[in-house]
Image: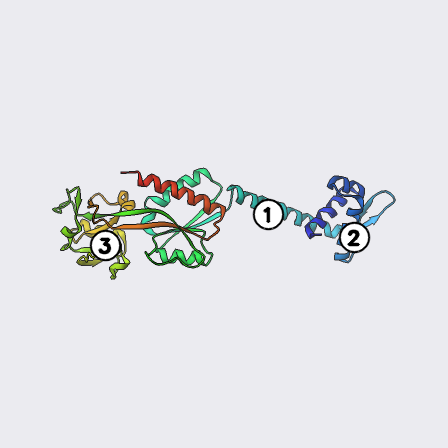
């Protein structure tokens, strides 16, 4: 017999004052109640009830055990309530990770909709490169992450990828640039421009798919931070690629131009989860899918 059941029987007998009455309340036989009380007395090494001509009463040992048994019961009730809250999304914690430009539109919109549906679930969100979040997921330290995984590289063991969308790149120019008023521009027309990039290896930047297709831009300024990149563009120091999902956050003194469909680099964006996601992670994943679909349909 499980310990918590023994305590439940003990509390019922203490409350009702007899084995018979406790059996009736619990739906057990009187002999089953008697056996379980005896098991608990054997476990504790003390008599817990005085057997009286009519009913029972607690011994000194029983009175000592009583508040501890009540505490066990209360903790179990609280645990069941918390587990039920996790199951019904009325409580719990979702540990969420995402890379920086996903936080411009995709993640915050999904998080706002998720909070409206499940206000009792707390979301702890961290930002960083995709490789960091994939490692945290593999280590069990995150529940879900929005990532841009490297093409051709499988995720770490224990991580499942769920494709959300393929995000096109735009080119950011200063307003006075000769191409600033164009509807679309070919990358070859920008080959001699000074490109502002976020890493020395172009394969580690937004240029990765364009480089794979044979385009080798002339890089000038290296800037890791988006504020620095766009500040440099506005000052006329060069041009840079901007993910479409981050377009709404671009400063007003920078012009965005669409890249010709034959040249446009795309970035694969995925949600990453353990093979069996938590209830909250599964619900947030569905919200990400809805949000990504809405963003794809937005011109």
Residue under the image location 35 percent in, 59 percent down: 153
Few, some or many residues within 10 Å of mark 1 (<14, 14–19, 20+): few
Mark 2 or mark 1: name the one nearer the start of the chain: 2
Mark 3 or 1 closer to N-term? 1
Q: Nearer the viewer, residue 59 or 77?
A: 77
Q: Position of residue 155 (x, y in %)?
A: 39, 57
Rounded to the nearest angstrom, the CA distance separating label 3 from label 2 is 77 Å
Of labels 3 and 2, earlier in sequence is 2
Q: Residue 250's spot in the image, x, y percent? A: 25, 45
Q: Pointer 3: what residue?
A: 210
Q: Is residue 153 left or right of residue 215?
A: right
Residue in the foreground of this view, choosing between 78 and 284: 284
Please identify, in this view, whether the residue under mark 3 or under mark 1 is nearer the observer.
3
Q: 26 or 15, which lies in front?
A: 26
Q: CA distance from mark 2 to mark 1?
A: 27 Å
Left or right of residue 268, residue 278 in this image: right
Evaluate whether residue 115 shows in this view: yes
Q: What whole-number distance in Å separates the C-alpha atoms at marks 3 and 1?
A: 53 Å
| SS for dot 1 | helix
Residue corresponding to mark 2: 38
User: Dot 3: what SS?
Assistant: helix
Report which residue position mark 1 lands on: 79
Residue 28, given in percent of the width and then of the height, sits at 75, 43
What is the quadrant of residue 133 in the picture? Answer: bottom left
């Amino acid at each position: 017999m499980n310990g918590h059941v023994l305590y439940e029987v003990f509390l019922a007998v203490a409350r009702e004052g007899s084995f018979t009455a406790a059996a009736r309340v619990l739906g057990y036989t009187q002999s089953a109640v008697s056996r379980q009380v005896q098991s608990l007395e054997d476990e504790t090494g003390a008599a817990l009830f005085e057997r009286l001509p009519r009913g029972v009463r607690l011994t000194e040992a029983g009175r000592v055990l009583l508040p501890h048994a009540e505490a066990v019961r209360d903790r179990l009730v609280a645990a069941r309530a918390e587990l039920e809250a996790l199951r019904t999304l009325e409580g719990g914690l979702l540990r969420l990770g995402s890379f920086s430009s996903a936080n411009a539109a995709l993640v915050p919109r999904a998080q706002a909709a998720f909070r409206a549906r499940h206000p009792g679930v707390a979301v702890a969100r961290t930002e960083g490169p995709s490789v960091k979040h994939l490692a945290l997921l593999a280590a069990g330290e995150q529940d879900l992450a929005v990532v841009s995984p490297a093409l051709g590289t499988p995720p770490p063991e224990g991580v499942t990828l769920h494709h959300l969308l393929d995000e096109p790149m735009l080119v950011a120019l200063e307003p006075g640039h000769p191409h600033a008023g164009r509807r679309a521009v070919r990358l070859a027309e920008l080959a001699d421009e000074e490109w502002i990039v976020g890493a020395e290896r172009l394969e580690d930047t937004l240029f990765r798919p364009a480089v794979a297709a044979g385009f080798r831009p002339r890089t000038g300024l290296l800037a890791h931070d988006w504020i620095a990149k766009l500040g440099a563009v506005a000052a006329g120091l060069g041009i840079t690629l901007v993910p479409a999902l981050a377009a709404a956050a671009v400063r007003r003194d920078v012009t965005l131009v669409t890249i010709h469909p034959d040249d446009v680099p795309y970035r694969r964006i995925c949600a990453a989860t353990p093979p069996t996601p938590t209830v909250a992670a599964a619900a947030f994943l569905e919200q990400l899918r809805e949000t990504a679909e809405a963003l794809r349909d937005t011109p």
